[in-house]
Image: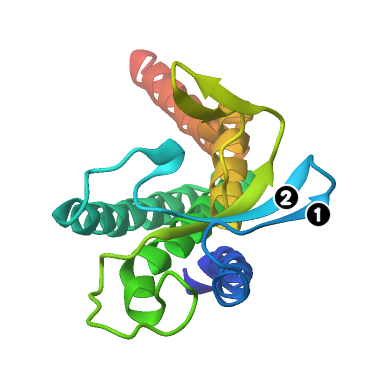
Amino acid sequence: MFKKIFPYIALAMLLILIDQAIKIYIKTNFDLGEERKILGNFFKLHFIENPGMAFGMSFGPGMGKFLLSLFSILAVGGIVYFLIYAIKNKRPKGLAISIACILGGAIGNIIDRVFYDVLFDNRGAFPDGKREYMFGEVVDMFYFDIWHGEIGGMYVSLWPIFNFADLAISVGVVSILIFQKRFLGISKENKQKAAAELSTEVKTDTSSANP
């Protein structure tokens, strides 16, 4: 089983390494809120820290951060189970790759929540006061500045700022949604096995009906 699952775990680990390398670079080279243009005004690096989930949703400050970190860790357990299930049941490799992308992205963001409050302060330097595990914030930096402005007195951006882990999760989820019929349907091997079993049952019934 380990040989079968290893390539997908390796993919997840590679995604985690890329994600963390980008985040550590941003944390140690940008001030919070700093923005640098990459492709004019269209694509920028904009350093923010997200205390909650995607699109700013959160469980609230303080204990809410802890609960979100705990929930994320438990969710990873479910993702790993789903990956093992997909491999054991000989689902298409594309499904396992998609799950590995989701796994790598999820762990990448969990590292921020669990460790970054201890490792870094908001200026990207090592913290100078008491810090705690499980209370960190996720580092976001990729920003497609398609449109932003005020709606009803609130600042709104058409495209949220995200990170590499979010991208990996999105690729995995979108792939599963697009190819769900192929990924989540009955695999070719299982179809052949089911057909063989049905054929055997039919032959057995026919034999017993004609002594």
Is any part of residue 3 visible from this angle?
Answer: yes
| Mark linked to residue 169 | none
Q: Nearer the viewer, residue 38 or 14?
A: 38
Residue placed at 59% from the left, 65% from the top?
Answer: 19
Task: Provide the secondary structure element on which disc 2 rests.
Answer: strand
Q: Amino acid at mark 2?
A: Lys
**Colour mapping used in the image:** rainbow
Q: Position of residue 55 (x, y in %)?
A: 45, 37
Furthest residue toward right: 40
Q: Are marks 1 and 2 in contact (CB under 8 Å)?
A: yes
- Residue assigned mark 1: 38
Mark 1 Cα-neighbour bin, 10 Å: few <14, some 14–19, many ≥20: few
Residue 118, position in %: x, y? Answer: 32, 79
Q: Nearer the viewer, residue 57 or 127?
A: 127
In the picture, measured across the screen, residue 51 lies left or right of residue 141, that is left
Residue in the picture at 63% in, 75% down: 29
Please give the label number shown on residue 44.
2
- Residue placed furthest toward the front: 153
Q: Residue at x 46, y 30 (%)?
A: 200
In the image: residue 131, left or right of residue 44? left
Q: Earlier in the sequence, mark 1 or mark 2?
A: 1
